[in-house]
Image (cartoon, rainbow, N blue to C red):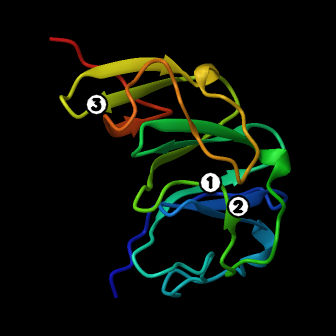
Amino acid sequence: EGDHLINVIRTEGEDNIVLATANGMAICFNENDVRPMGRDAAGVRGIQLRDGDSVVLMKQINDEGEIIIATDEGKFKKVLCALIEPMGRYKKGTLIVSMKDGASVICASYVTMPYSIAIVDKANNVVEVSSEDVPIAMQSAKARKISACAEDNVKYVVAENYKLIKD
């Protein structure tokens, strides 16, 4: 009860699946850890969620690319996928970003080629930055402020495929 489907991925049989949560946790496991099922099956659990936590990213990855993390503190970071160690599924995972109490991940995205990120502030102003502007950091490190936006002024972040519509 209360579960929602967030993603469906057609896989090739050799990659890993990464899940990231709003509380800054992440897990990476081999896709072969998920058994094949019929369409009426309930599925398998990917990560043990703490009370109040939710999944913000589910993506098929390989050792290339990075995971971009954006927090509601207005801070950003990239984590190299090659540094995210695979483990068995349905564990608590490991910390992917350290945040102050009460903060949360508002966007997590996988990047293999540079793309634009739209940052919307609390006054609904939109700033576009390149994924290349987000600093790379160790997995458990804190995210950092980037020059394009004021700290604690980010409403939401849209990464990957988006298009700004101009009047």
Q: How many marks?
A: 3
Q: Quadrant of the C terminus?
A: top left
> The residue tagged with tag 3: helix, strand or loop?
strand
Q: Residue at x 50, y 64 (%)?
A: 23
| Residue identifier under label 1 | 59
**Residue 91 spot, x, y in % from top left:** 69, 80
- Mark sitting earlier along the chain (3/1): 1
Which one is in front, 36 or 63?
Answer: 63
* Residue kind at label 2, given as amino acid type: Ile
The answer to whether 98 appears left or right of 73 in the picture is right
C-alpha separation, residue under disc 3 versus residue under disc 2: 31 Å
Q: Nearer the viewer, mark 3 or mark 1?
A: 3
Q: Residue at x 56, y 83 (%)?
A: 43
Local secondary structure at mark 2: strand
Which of the numbered marks, if any, corresponds to residue 121? 3
* Side (left or right) of 128 relative to 26: left
Q: Image quarter for residue 48?
A: bottom right
